[in-house]
Amino acid sequence: MVREKGSGLPLPFANVFVNNTTKGIATDEEGRFTLSGNFPLEIELVASFMGFVTQVKTISFVGNKEVEVFFELAFNESNLSEVELKAKRDKSWERISKI
């Protein structure tokens, strides 16, 4: 399950994948995911979501049991920057539109 750290809200459509493989999935609306396949006894599972800090967990398997994994991703405040918008009239466009 992938949730937002602090609020505990689910992060729908977060990316969850096995590191150094092509196996991955997006979470559902509730932040849940299921990965299946033949994995080694130990894998690195990665959860990422735009605007949040990526989290990596090492998962060890014992037998063929299902493993529940919980991620709590923190908001990445260092990605925020100031944006300044400016507007000006395009004189050439104004001349063309008056014709």
Image (tube, rainbow, N blue to C red):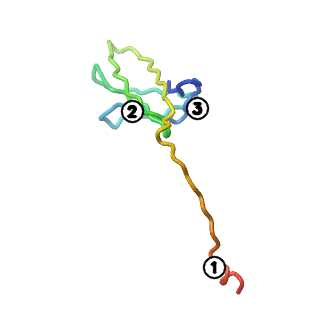
Residue type of the residue flagged with mark 2: Phe
Q: Can you identify the residue that label 1 sits on?
A: 91
**Tag 1, which secondary structure?**
helix
Residue at image location 51% in from the left, 46% down from the top: 81
Say whether disc 3 or disc 1 marks the residue closer to the N-terminus. 3
Q: In terms of depth relative to the viewer, which is nearer, 48 or 27?
A: 48
Residue at image location 46% in from the left, 26% down from the top: 34
- Location of the C terminus (image quadrant): bottom right
Q: Residue furthest right?
A: 98
**Tag 2, which secondary structure?**
strand
Image spot of residue 35 (x, y percent): 42, 27
Number of the front mark, 3 or 1: 1
Residue type of the residue flagged with mark 3: Glu
Q: CA gap, disc 2 to disc 3?
A: 17 Å
Residue at image location 57% in from the left, 28% down from the top: 10
Specify the label residue 29 is tagged with.
Answer: 3
Q: In terms of depth relative to the viewer, which is nearer, 97 or 14?
A: 97
